[in-house]
Image: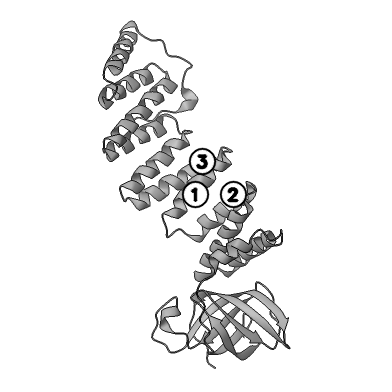
């Protein structure tokens, strides 16, 4: 496979008369047959041989679009990959490759293309393009916490604060669910800092709200350091979190362990044990009626501790 390094391109190669003649003839052929991808592709190759890279890419792009329009997705992808080899800075080609992979159902390949395009655009100072590529990446589903965190940081840098808050929260959740509590705390702090900007996020909190069940379940709460434990009763639970009262206050962002007889349909894992145990992050703690109302988000399931 031939690789073209833009650092070594001359401004213009000497063009032999027969190469110029071929280019002129193929230009006429393209004008006469505008929907013939093979002719346009050959013209692109001729321009590449002549060192006229931008002209070559113009015709390769045309070829890729012709193949796509006629349903030849794999051929279109091959031409876009050729553009990427000719000009590695053409990150739009990587995005179009991702689009075609996604349309073909090749999700893993699409993710790689979107991530590569997003990272390259970010490094090249194209922040908006990087954000768009990462949004396409996350729209494919099953993305890891790091991708959500990266998109959150970029949105924050671009002053898309509500979007940044949403992605910091989703990154926090994913880090929690994989037991990466330090990273979860970092995401929680950044989301909280954005919340302090004002009331702009009240709408996004409403979007995140899910069905809560007013189940009064005997709940054991254990501190992260195992220094204390306290029995209480849940006020309500959902798939993602729980609310309860405690006698003692707990710090916002702290990690606790909760154990309770959670219904199996609300568990992250459908274990057979009667007691469900999970790490949880404290998202709210406020004094109320002589107690402390605590809201916590479930994280990674864990083995129950002896009561």
Query: Residue at coordinates 55% horizontally, 82% vertically from top-left?
Result: 236
Tag 1 secondary structure = helix
- Counting other residues with Cα less than 10 Å from the Cα at mark 3, is it few (<14), some (14-19), or many (20 or more)? many
Tag 3 secondary structure = helix
- Counting other residues with Cα less than 10 Å from the Cα at mark 2, is it few (<14), some (14-19), or many (20 or more)? many
Corner quadrant of residue 222: bottom right
| Res. 1 visible in picture | no
Locate residue 100, reporting x and y percent.
Answer: 35, 43
Tag 2 secondary structure = helix
Question: Which residue does the numbered mark 3 point to in the structure image?
Answer: 120
Q: Which residue is more in the foreground, 62 or 23? A: 62
- Does the residue at mark 1 contact the one at mark 2 (Cβ under 8 Å)? yes
Question: Which residue does the numbered mark 2 point to in the structure image?
Answer: 154
Mark sitting earlier along the chain (3/1): 3
Query: Residue at coordinates 34% horizontally, 22% vertically from top-left?
Result: 44
Query: Residue at coordinates 42% horizontally, 13% vertically from top-left?
Result: 13
Quarter placement of the N terminus = top left
Locate residue 249, reporting x and y percent.
Answer: 71, 82
């Amino acid at each position: 496979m031939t690789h073209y390094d833009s650092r070594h391109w001359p401004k213009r190669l000497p063009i032999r008369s027969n190469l110029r003649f071929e280019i002129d003839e193929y230009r006429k052929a393209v004008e006469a047959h505008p929907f013939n991808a093979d002719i346009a592709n050959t013209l692109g190759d001729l321009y590449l041989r002549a060192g006229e890279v931008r002209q070559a890419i113009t015709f390769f792009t045309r070829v890729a679009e012709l193949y796509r329009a006629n349903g030849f997705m794999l051929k279109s992808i091959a031409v876009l990959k050729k553009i990427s080899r000719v000009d590695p800075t053409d990150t739009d080609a990587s995005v179009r490759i991702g689009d075609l992979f996604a349309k073909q159902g090749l999700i893993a390949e699409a993710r790689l293309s979107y991530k590569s395009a997003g990272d390259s655009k970010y490094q090249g100072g194209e922040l908006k393009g990087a954000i768009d590529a990462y949004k396409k990446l996350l729209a494919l589903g099953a993305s890891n916490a790091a991708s959500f965190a990266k998109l959150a940081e970029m949105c924050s840098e671009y002053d898309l604060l509500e979007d940044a808050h949403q992605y910091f929260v989703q990154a926090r959740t994913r880090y929690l669910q994989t037991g990466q509590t330090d990273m979860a705390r970092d995401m929680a702090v950044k989301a909280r800092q954005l919340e302090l900007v004002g009331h702009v996020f009240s709408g996004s909190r409403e979007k995140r709200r899910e069905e809560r069940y007013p189940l009064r379940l005997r709940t054991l709460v254990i501190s992260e350091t195992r220094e204390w434990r306290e029995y209480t009763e849940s006020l309500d639970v959902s798939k993602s979190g729980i609310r309860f009262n405690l006698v003692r206050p707990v710090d916002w962002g702290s990690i606790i362990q909760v154990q309770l007889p959670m219904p199996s349909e609300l568990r992250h894992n459908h274990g057979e044990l009667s007691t469900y145990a999970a790490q949880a992050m404290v998202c709210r703690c406020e004094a109320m009626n002589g107690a402390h109302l605590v809201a916590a988000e479930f994280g990674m399931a864990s083995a129950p501790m002896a009561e």
